[in-house]
Image: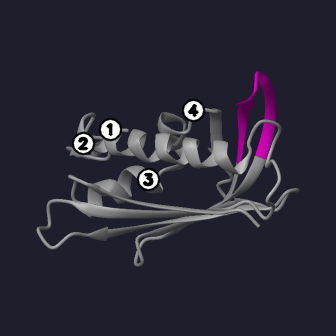
Amino acid sequence: MSEHERSIVINTPHEQAFRFLSSVSSLPTFLPWLRSIREDPRGDEVFGVAEFNGERQEISGFYRVSRTAKRIDWGSDGTPEYRGWLEIKPEANGKSCKLTAHISTGTDKELRPGFTPQRIESLFDQVMNSIKHQLEVQHAGELVGQERIQ
């Protein structure tokens, strides 16, 4: 089993980070392989289009949001098994938060062609840095009247 975990402190209040990260429509802004995604309005299923190594693929899975725990769980029941979670905790100063994300691929082999455990580690760093940029520089998740910036 291939397990990967990262933590990062972001200079954004935890509620703002949670607003951004809990919205399925935000995913393509920080997942470079995701071209589109939509939620099933009847449950926690998501469907999307991704591009891996130049090949477009339809994907499906779940995206579960716990507002009280400020935690998001996602995954696919496909082969190989892929699951992950992200927790958002406020820092003592109230102006920043700590994101901890964990991914389990269910295999030590390639998740998809070209997605070796080493490549996943590199992508994980890129995704966490992209989230930090979206929240700190682009102010994603910030409330503007009744709307939110995504």
Residue at 28%, 34% (x, y): give it. 138
Rendered location of residue 110, percent (x, y): 81, 48
Task: Report the residue marked by disc 1.
Answer: 133
First in residue order: circle 3 vs circle 4: 3
Please provide the residue range marked out in magenta: 47-59
Disc 4 and disc 1 in contact, CB within 8 angstroms: no
Horizontally, residue 50 falls left or right of residue 67, namely right
Task: Report the residue marked by disc 3.
Answer: 21
Disc 3 and disc 2 in contact, CB within 8 angstroms: no
Disc 2 and disc 1 in contact, CB within 8 angstroms: yes
First in residue order: circle 3 vs circle 2: 3
Residue at 42%, 77% (x, y): give it. 69
Task: Report the residue marked by disc 4.
Answer: 32
Q: Tell me if residue 22 can be seen.
A: yes
| Farthest-out residue, bottom | 68
Residue 140, picture quadrant? top left
Residue 57 painted magenta: yes
Q: Main secondary structure of the magenta part?
A: strand
Residue 49 or residue 7, whichever sits in front: 7
- For badge 3, the amino acid type reads Leu
For the C terminus, give its image quadrant: top left
Q: Mark 1 packing: few (<14 Cα in 10 Å), some, or many (20+)?
A: some
Residue at 21%, 69% (x, y): give it. 91
- For badge 4, the amino acid type reads Pro
- For badge 1, the amino acid type reads His
Label 2 secondary element = helix
Q: Mark 3 packing: few (<14 Cα in 10 Å), some, or many (20+)?
A: many
Rendered location of residue 106, percent (x, y): 78, 65
- Residue 136 image label: 2
